[in-house]
Amino acid sequence: MSEKRTEIEGTGEFRLIQKLTSNFINRQSSTLKGIGDDAAVISISDTHAMVISTDSFLEGVHFNLMYTPFKHLGYKCVVAAISDVIAMNVVPQQIVISVAVSNRFPIEVLEELYEGIHTACDVYTLDLVGGDTNPSVSGMQISITTVGTAKKEQIVYRDTAKENDLIVVTGDLGAPYMGLQILEREKEVFKANPGIQPDLEGNDYLLERQLKPEARKDILRFLEELKVKPTAMIDLSDGLASDLFQICEASGLGCSVYDEKIPIDAKTSMAAIDFNIDPVTAALNGGDDYELLFTIALSDYDKIKGNPHMTVIGHMADAASGKLFIDKNGSVVPLKAQAW
Amino acid sequence: MSEKRTEIEGTGEFRLIQKLTSNFINRQSSTLKGIGDDAAVISISDTHAMVISTDSFLEGVHFNLMYTPFKHLGYKCVVAAISDVIAMNVVPQQIVISVAVSNRFPIEVLEELYEGIHTACDVYTLDLVGGDTNPSVSGMQISITTVGTAKKEQIVYRDTAKENDLIVVTGDLGAPYMGLQILEREKEVFKANPGIQPDLEGNDYLLERQLKPEARKDILRFLEELKVKPTAMIDLSDGLASDLFQICEASGLGCSVYDEKIPIDAKTSMAAIDFNIDPVTAALNGGDDYELLFTIALSDYDKIKGNPHMTVIGHMADAASGKLFIDKNGSVVPLKAQAW
């Protein structure tokens, strides 16, 4: 080991992987897209390509077994994994799963986990085509690889947004983050007094968005029907701000996002206020939304106007303008993202 | 969670994954092979298919950082991962890597790990097309997905061995296992007295086979040149006995393996005797060899006879004959495999 010591914690996750892989070169002519998007793209014929992505979920980092039922965990990991392929405008078709699990768990736990995986395969018409189970000396870990095949011209990347394109998000944001806050609060209450039943009443929507989210495969069909091909797309896993940064950086552009346009459910706002959190902070930095963030040409605006699944929240700009956030008073401030 | 509790430890690894996925069905017409081989096979055109496999490596289970240099670790994980695709008679082309790492490590450690991955990509002409790095609250974990494209007719499965086919292994077996024994012994010595330098002299071959193994991509070219297409193939990762069981069970056959035919290097034998281990036990149950185990039609025997890379160790038989091991005295005993 060299003597120099640079802390991992000080380096943003995205910069880190760029740094580690900067000297790698691609030699296979079939590699159309390597590192730097939601998924890699491999040419399989003149007209078609396969999209492939891997996602890992670690106990204590991505999930807490204290309040995550194993069935939900299996379902959620599949959703999060296939969301990366969906974000390439490609329908996920097959998944491969690796599970590392401590012997402290009985097999019934794995059966429940696979029941959740099975349900997700049903709901999203996926084939589980491979898997292994390894002993773990520490926490549970789940790695999922997702593949899907599509026409090359159909695939949407991150780095192809254009100046003045509109920025669109699907669904509403921040709910999973507030669901997590509620679960964390009840965990602390339970730890302090195991006799008290958790108070989760009235929070079904927020808890479900956190514990059993859905991937927006439906949006791909809507876009096809509307004849809208996004100019760039990413899924919202790290929070709107961070994921929008990815599109901006990859496309070499800036952006303007309007606070008042960001879709936030009333239940999310109420919970946020309850926790003394600005609702828009939950939307910008919460993460785990698994909604889609994409850009479209201005000329496509009429096609999505009024669509209940899609909200225009701003527009792309030249890089020199920076990444801007316009708050409810009209003040313009720099948009900030945690992982950068 | 249900109240029934079945211990994971009591269930063989292979039976466990079968049990967990027995109720999964395949819906995608492109899925040619799902769970149950070294890799999954997905049709990508009338003539071609893509082979995909995932492998996970966990600190404390698959590697010990006390004696594994990070550069070697990166190299070895790639070798082990691509070996599964090679075992389908397919040249691996792209890999995707997920690393989970504790903040206790400095970035320089990750750089060394990726240096090893980079070297492996050079040696095996692989493109690293995706990767993420996650924080881990416990040990280091590396997951690698490997893909390769091939003509459908070229792909070799596990379940297609025929009665009377010859059983062939490449290289020599048991060396990585003896390398591991030496490293474990020196670790104990070091723990008891940190002042003593490890005594690894004269064991280069065994240590290199353990710490920096190679995948037998070269064998695919040899087989092509010899015009031999194996009837079934698997890579030797869990030990000869266990991996041969896989071919037998998948193909619905028995086998006879001859002790005296199993290729074991003299250095492996000498180390085994030193450790009071029967050398053939190291070969049968040691694992981590990353050699290939395949079956060929009797009519192909002349093509591989005398080939320095390949050794015939026995033949397939009908299921009723069982899986037999013929020792040096000619005694016939049942072949035993640990993971079953």
Image (spheres, coloured by chain):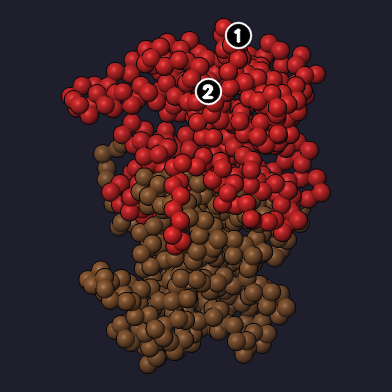
Chain colours: A red, B brown
Residue B240 appears in the rendering: no
Q: How many marks?
A: 2
Q: Classify A204 as above or below B215.
A: above
Please identify the quadrant where the N terminus of chain B is shown.
Answer: top left
Q: Is residue A296 above or below residue B89?
A: above
Residue B24, placed above or below residue B307: above
**Does residue B225 appear in the picture of this structure?**
yes
In this view, the residue in front, B19 or A260, is A260
Residue ranking furthest to the bottom: B329
Q: Residue at x 50, y 46 (%)?
A: B133
Q: Pointer 1: what residue?
A: A330
Q: Are the residues at dot 2 and dot 1 in contact (C-beta closer than 8 Å)?
A: no
User: Mark 2 to mark 1: distance in Å?
Assistant: 18 Å
Instruction: Please tell me which residue is depicted at 68% across the width and 85% down the height of the picture.
Output: B303
State the image coordinates of residue B305 (x, y, percent, origin top left). 63, 88
Taking depth in this image into account, of B236 and A322 the one nearest to the observer is A322
* Residue depth check, mark 2 versus mark 1: number of the one nearer the observer: 1
Question: Which residue in the protein does label 2 denote?
Answer: A284
